Image (cartoon, grey):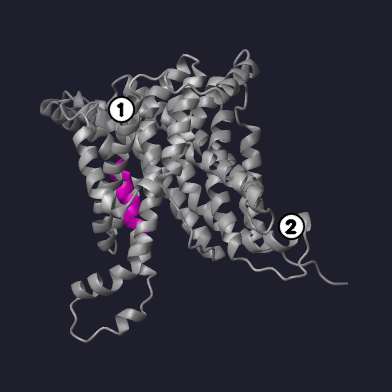
C-alpha cells in the first residue's frame, strides 16, 4: 500500500493562515447594531442610481484640490524616493524607509495638522513622506533586478555615474514610469481620504453628504472620482506633467498661515511623555514606568490584538474572494463582453479607498469589525483579482483542455495559485496599515486609540501609539518576506 503523499509547503502555509483567521473570526465583533440597516441600504442603492451632480457646492474645487494634492504628493515621493533608492544599500536608509512607509497617510496627516494646520503642506507631506519610503524600496528592487548584461558591454574606465545614467537608468525607466502611474492612482485615493481630516478634497464632501444621508450626492462624488481614475491614461501625459505640477501648486490655498512657535512647542513639549514634561524632582522613572504600563497594557496591547485579528481575517478573506474575482477578466474563462463588465466591476472595487468603503458600511451596520472586514476584503481582492486575471493572459492551454469549472479547477487554479499567494503576502503589510487606520472610524484597532489621543490633545500618547503601529507593520513585513522567501514566492506584479 502506497504511503500518503506529503502535503506541500504551500498547502500547509495556506491551512495555517485559514485556521488562524477562523480562530480570529470566532472572537471577532461582527454585530450589526443599527436599527434599520436594510432600510438605509435601500436608500443608499436608490442614491447610487440617481446621482445628483449639482448638490455639492464648489464641486469643481474639490476635484481640483484632490488632483493637486495627489500630483504634488506623489511628485514629492518620487523625487525623494528615487534619491533614497540610490542609497538603499545603507541599513540606516532601509530602516528609515521601512519606518516612514509603515505609518499610514492619515496618521501623518494627523501629525502635520498639529504643525501646519489645514495648509497645503499637511496634505502634500502626508502623501509624500510615506510614498517616498515605498517608492525607494520598489525602485531599489527594480534597479537590483535589472539585466546586468548591458553593464558588461560598456568600455573600461567608464565612471559609475555615466554607467548609471546611460545604461542602468534607461533599462529601468519604463518600470519606473509604470509604477509611478500606479502610485499616482494610489495618491488620488489617499488625497480623497485626506478630506476626512478636514482638507478640502472629495473626502470632505463625502463625509458631509454621508452624515446627512444625501446618497444621491455621494453617488455623484464617487462617479466623478472613478472617472478621474479610469481616465488617468488619457489625461496623464509626460509632456503635460510640468504644467500639471505648476498648476497644482498655484491653485492650492497657500495663504493659510501656521505658527513657528506652535511647531516648536509641539516638537519640544507636546510629544514629550507627560511624566518627563512635568518632572519636578520626584521619582521620574517610577512615574514614567507607570505611564508606559498604562499606555501599553490598556491601549497598545488591546489595540494591537484587534488590529492583528482584523488583519488576519481580511487577509484570508481577500484570498478567497480573489479566487472569485480573477476569472471575471480572464480570457481563458469568459468572452470579451463578460470580461468588459468584469473589468468595470474591478475598477470600481479597487478604486474605492478602503477607508471610504468602510465608512459607508459603518453608516449602514454600525461600528463593529464587520464593515472593516468587508471593506478591506473587497478592495484588496479587487486589486489582486485584477493582477491575477491579467496574469492568466500569459497562460497557454492545450487545444484539448477541459472547459467550464473543470478548466478553472484543474488547468488555471494550479498555475496561478503560487502567484496569488505571493501577491497576498506582499499585500499583508498594506492590509495591516489600513486596518490600523480604520480605528479612526470607531473600530477598536490601534487607530481608535491614536485618534482618541489626538482628540484629547494628548499628543505624547498619540505618538507612542503611532510608533507601536509602525513597529507592528515592520514586524509583519519581515514575517511576510521570510514566508515568501521560504516558499520561493516571486512575482513581477508586486504592488504596495
Which residue is drawn at the image coordinates 25% and 47% (left, top)?
76
Taking 100 as reference, is 330 left or right?
Answer: right
Which numbered disc, 1 or 2, marks the residue that appears first in the sequence?
Answer: 1
Taking 170 as reference, is 413 left or right?
Answer: right
Question: Dot 2: what SS?
Answer: helix
Depth check, front residue: 250 or 433: 250
Residue 445 seen from this side: no
Residues at marks 1 and 2 touching, judged by CB atoms closer than 8 Å: no
Q: Residue tagged by mark 2?
A: 409
Q: Which mark's residue is nearer the viewer, 1 or 2? A: 1
Depth check, front residue: 403 or 481: 403
Q: Which residues are magenta?
A: 127-138
Q: Quadrant of residue 471?
A: top left
Which residue is drawn at the image coordinates 32% and 24% (left, top)?
198
Looking at the rendered image, the quarter that the N terminus falls into is bottom right
Q: Residue tagged by mark 1?
A: 61
Depth check, front residue: 65 or 87: 65
Question: Dot 1: what SS?
Answer: helix
Q: Is residue 475 magenta?
A: no
Q: Where is residue 242 drawn, in percent x and y? A: 22, 49
Residue 268 seen from this side: yes
Q: Quadrant of residue 257?
A: top left
Q: Where is residue 49 drawn, in percent x and y? A: 57, 25
Separation of marks 1 and 2 at Cα, in angstroms: 49 Å
- Residue 88: image tag: none
Is disc 2 surrounded by few (<14), some (14 to 19) or many (20+) residues within 10 Å?
Answer: few
Q: Where is residue 179 drawn, in percent x and y? A: 39, 55
Outermost residue on the left side: it is: 261
Which residue is drawn at the image coordinates 45% and 53% (left, top)?
495
Q: Main secondary structure of the magenta part?
A: helix
Is disc 1 surrounded by few (<14), some (14 to 19) or many (20+) residues within 10 Å?
Answer: some
Amino acid at each position: 500500500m502506497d504511503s500518503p503523499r506529503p502535503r506541500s509547503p504551500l498547502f500547509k502555509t495556506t491551512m495555517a493562515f485559514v485556521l488562524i483567521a477562523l480562530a480570529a473570526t470566532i472572537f471577532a465583533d461582527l454585530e450589526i447594531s443599527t436599527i434599520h440597516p436594510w432600510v438605509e441600504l435601500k436608500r443608499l442603492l436608490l442614491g447610487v442610481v440617481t446621482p445628483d451632480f449639482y448638490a455639492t457646492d464648489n464641486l469643481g474645487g474639490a476635484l481640483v484640490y484632490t488632483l493637486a494634492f495627489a500630483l504634488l504628493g506623489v511628485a514629492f515621493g518620487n523625487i525623494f524616493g528615487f534619491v533614497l533608492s540610490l542609497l538603499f544599500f545603507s541599513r540606516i536608509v532601509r530602516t528609515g524607509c521601512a519606518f516612514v512607509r509603515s505609518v499610514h497617510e492619515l496618521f501623518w496627516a494627523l501629525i502635520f495638522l498639529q504643525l501646519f494646520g489645514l495648509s497645503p503642506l499637511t496634505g502634500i507631506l502626508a502623501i509624500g513622506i510615506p510614498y517616498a519610503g515605498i517608492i525607494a524600496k520598489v525602485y531599489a528592487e527594480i534597479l537590483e533586478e535589472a539585466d546586468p548584461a548591458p553593464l558588461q558591454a560598456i568600455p573600461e574606465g567608464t565612471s559609475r555615474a555615466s554607467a548609471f545614467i546611460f545604461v542602468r537608468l534607461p533599462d529601468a525607466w519604463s518600470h519606473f514610469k509604470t509604477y509611478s502611474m500606479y502610485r499616482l492612482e494610489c495618491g488620488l485615493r489617499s488625497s480623497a481620504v485626506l478630506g476626512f481630516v478636514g482638507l478640502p478634497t472629495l473626502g470632505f464632501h463625502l463625509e458631509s453628504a454621508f452624515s446627512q444621508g444625501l446618497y444621491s450626492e455621494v453617488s455623484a462624488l464617487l462617479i466623478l472620482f472613478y472617472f478621474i481614475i479610469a481616465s488617468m491614461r488619457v489625461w496623464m501625459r509626460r509632456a503635460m506633467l510640468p504644467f500639471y505640477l505648476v498648476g497644482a501648486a498655484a491653485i492650492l490655498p497657500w495663504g493659510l498661515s501656521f505658527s513657528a512657535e506652535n511647531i516648536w512647542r509641539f516638537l519640544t513639549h507636546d510629544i514629550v511623555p507627560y511624566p518627563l514634561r512635568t518632572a519636578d524632582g520626584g521619582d521620574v522613572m517610577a512615574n514614567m514606568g507607570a505611564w508606559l504600563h498604562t499606555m501599553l497594557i490598556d491601549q497598545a496591547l488591546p489595540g494591537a490584538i484587534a488590529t492583528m485579528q482584523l488583519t488576519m481575517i481580511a487577509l484570508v478573506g481577500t484570498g478567497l474572494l480573489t479566487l472569485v474575482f480573477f476569472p471575471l477578466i480572464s480570457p481563458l474563462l469568459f468572452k470579451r463582453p463578460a470580461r468588459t463588465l468584469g473589468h468595470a466591476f474591478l475598477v470600481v472595487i479597487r478604486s474605492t479607498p478602503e477607508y471610504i468603503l468602510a465608512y459607508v458600511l459603518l453608516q449602514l451596520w454600525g461600528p463593529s469589525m464587520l464593515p472593516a472586514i468587508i471593506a478591506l476584503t473587497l478592495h484588496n481582492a479587487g486589486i489582486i483579482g485584477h493582477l491575477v486575471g491579467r496574469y492568466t493572459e500569459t497562460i497557454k492551454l492545450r487545444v484539448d483542455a477541459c472547459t467550464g469549472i473543470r478548466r478553472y479547477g484543474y488547468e488555471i487554479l494550479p498555475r496561478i495559485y503560487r502567484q496569488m499567494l505571493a501577491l497576498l503576502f506582499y499585500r499583508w503589510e498594506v492590509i495591516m496599515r489600513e486596518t490600523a487606520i480604520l480605528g479612526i472610524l470607531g473600530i477598536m484597532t490601534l487607530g481608535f486609540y491614536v485618534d482618541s489621543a489626538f482628540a484629547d490633545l494628548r499628543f505624547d500618547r498619540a505618538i507612542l501609539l503611532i510608533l507601536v503601529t509602525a513597529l507592528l507593520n515592520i514586524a509583519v513585513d519581515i514575517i511576510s518576506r521570510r514566508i515568501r522567501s521560504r516558499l520561493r514566492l516571486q512575482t513581477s506584479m508586486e504592488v504596495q
